[in-house]
Amino acid sequence: MATNAKGIRLSRTSGGGLLLTLPDGRSFAGIQVVRAAPLSHPTHYICFLDSEGKEIFMMRDLSDLAPEDRPLMEEELRARYISSVIHRVISLRREGGTLYWETETDRGFREFVVQSSDENVRWLGERSLLLIDVDGNRLTVPDISELDRASARIVADNLI
Amino acid sequence: MSDFLEPAPATILERVNRDAAKKERVFIRVAADLDADGRFGCRWLVVTDRRVLLIDRAADRELSLHEIQSAQLDALVGGGRLVLRNGNRELGVLHFTNSALPKFAEAAAGIERLIRTGEAGLPAMVDRVRCESCRRLLPEKNGVCPKCLDRWSTVRALFRHLAPYRLPLLSLVAVLAVSIAAELAAPLAVRQILDRIVVPGMALGLLAWLVGILLAARLAMWLCETARGRLSVWLGHRVTADIRQTLFERVVRFPMRSIDGLSTATLLSRFVNDIARLEEFLGSGAPLLVMSALLLAGILAVLLYLSPSLTAAILLPVPLIILWTWFLWKRLRKAQDKQSASLASLSVQVSESLSGIRVVKAFCQEDKEYQRFQERNDRVRQRSAEAERESFIFFTVIYLLMNTGVFLIWFIGGRQVLQSTLTIGSLLAAASYLWMLYWPLQWFGQVSNSLNQAMTGAVQFFELTDSPVEEHCVPGLPVRRIQGLVRFRNVTFGYNANRPVLNEINFQVEPGEAIGIIGRSGTGKTTLMNLLCRFYEADRGAILVDGVDIRDYRLDEVRTQVAIVPQETFLFNGTIEENIRYGRPDATLEQIVAAARMANAHKFILERADGYDSLVGAGGDRLSGGERQRIAIARAILANPQILILDEATSSLDVESELAIQRALARVARNRTTFIIAHRLSTVRNVDRLLVLERGRIVETGTYDELLARKGLLWEFATAYAETRDLQ
């Protein structure tokens, strides 16, 4: 199981699935790409699974991929990991243990509700935040200090 | 059959109708919340009897229903996608977040059914995530909107629970009224003392009277306070105990489907948190609320009587006090919440580090634990300081505002005394009322919060108690004695409508037959038997017992004549005897012993010092797995059912005890129908007939030897089984 991605190729099949071709010529149709550690290493350790869910191999670094294949890979990852990045916090209300958010994200405006708990409001390190709303959707703030001042203040005021 | 339609804007409906040649039937109309570029937006899926439409902001895609061979739902991270395929070709893909996943799971199953049978067969209900009237996002799916909850109907429901306590309630109000009257009387007596005695120098007799009144007022207040405390606490506990009782009674009678839908955590939170809030509110919040309101009204009346102009002066800072409380109370609460959360996280860490102390030491990580503690400890210090600061600011400003009232009253009142338009006694009385007035005012700001929480709790609660329960005996259904003829006719069932566990099950069992059910785990063996016990109702098809649909029996008849020993044996905390007796409270000890003998449990029970009186511990943890199973079997045997179901009931026993139990059962089971679910083939070696299940369907039936000869699935199991035995 190689972790070196040099020489592998990705392409779309006519049916719409993803085709992986290894340097030795073997190819797999209908593969899935899965991040091993989507929160701590989103751009590293990407696993390729065959249509049965069995691992074909793990790629150590996304940038090992041929540059022309990378957009396809990113498109696939973005489709699989439906989480959004919060750019701006418009408002945040706390009522008892419930947080009502209105945010601007990389996917557009989003309003959501989070039941405040260690599982749903997860600090990944000092400044990075993962929120899981009542429906199980994921929203992240990769770096609190990169938010605008008003948003950062709202977050700091309301999150423990 | 119902349709699965979400309310859609007119433009979407227009686009669906625009190119419809003829009238067509719309089965499914749901919105995905991600657009084609993966941005939050809206994309509609519309399925009619002829076409499938994917409607985007810009373009529509239209597929003919004939083209589609499969509709597959892929669960992704944080959402999912619906893929419509023709063979391996993707015809259309729709992405959505987890918020829309449940309805698309239904839609995917609906499309599949539509392709195969021409009917979608979908639930009409779409989960509610927003309040229907104010469009606010709900804190729980299908839950109550905290803003729009119908306070009055809840208050009425609460009053219904208070109704049996009319007398204590009325005495509580009376006590409150007396105590308020006494509180109001005291300053008035002082006023008389000043105006009539001290200043003009009049009769001593009157002074004695007035001081007597003062004393009586204080005494009355003290007595009333004690009485109020006792009464309201008693009432609060009583009423909440009643409500808890009602809730529990309803919940144990819920159908299994409703119970599955409620997590244990949610239920516990209803029983513990919501009731605690309600209790706090009924016990202390509500009486204080009534008392403050009465007191305020009384004080205002007396003040107006003493001097209208002074009253105006006193009321001047009131709006400021209310505003201040309104604004800052939330901040104060937030700071206190943060403080208690940091304390909680500190104590979690302490208990974690200490309970894992062996691991900490084994890996030499004492320093790391020390540092983690230090971080949290620092945070507690910071948060506590912040909370203190907030509360300091809050109360100083309140005092300051109240004091402006004092200044005003002394200045305006003093001037009136100088002008002789007011007596000194009245001025002093007004000053004492001033303090009495402000406290309830700022208290109102705080109570609104606890009132809200209590109300939300109460609503969620009455919602539970108003849900339908199982009817144990529907009037009109005759009592029937079951003979044991069981027939499944085209039974299809799934715990979720989108994933059937059982598909078109058909079989018949004669009275007295012993049937073995085998198959891989997760193929629906237990589910099959759950349906026979009527824990769930079949989605389609019917289960007939003695030729009569099981739904036409009284539920209690079914449950008493069909006994099940479930996979996870559950024993209640109590003695062995109590546990065996559970289903038949009137059994004699002889009968209990006979049942235990048959279950091969008698011997190990006698080996214990307390015999049948031995305690089993919480969940039966003082017994071994095999012992627990045998007690559960004895419990089922004692109930003397016509149909007995053993669901992996002997899996923890050695083969010999299992055989002993089977022989004993066979002796008495002449006219009792028995179902035995097993993983171990030896368990079902001697049954009359075997049903082999695979992916929710019955794939083989026959005797053990017949099936073995057929070299089908059972033969596969048998070979694999023999191999593992060789390994041992």
Image: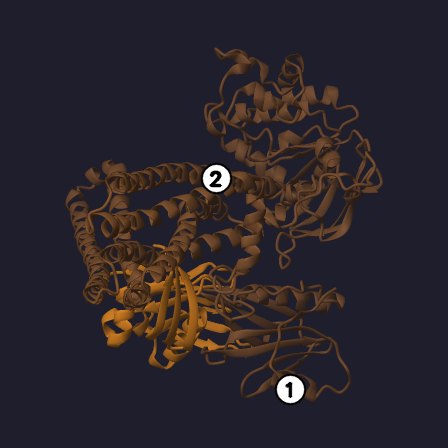
Chain colours: A orange, B brown
The quadrant holding residue B178 is top left
Q: Nearer the viewer, residue B374 or B461?
A: B461
Tag 1: residue type? Arg
Q: Residue at x 78, y 85 (%)?
A: B22
Residue B15's disc number: 1
Tag 2: residue type? Leu
- Say what secondary structure mark 1 lies in: helix
The residue pinned by badge 2 equals B235
Taking the image as drawn, is residue A41 in sight? Answer: no
Q: Crowding at label 1, few (<14), some or many (≥20) Cα neighbours within 10 Å?
A: few
Q: Nearer the viewer, residue A115 or B524?
A: A115
Q: Nearer the viewer, mark 1 or mark 2?
A: 2
Q: Chain of mark 2?
A: B
| Same-chain status of marks 1 and 2 | yes
Query: Label 1 vs label 2: CA separation?
Result: 61 Å
- Say what secondary structure mark 2 lies in: helix
Q: Nearer the viewer, residue B354 or B647?
A: B354
How many marks do you count on the picture? 2
Image position of B365 (left or right of B541)? left
Q: Chain of mark 1?
A: B
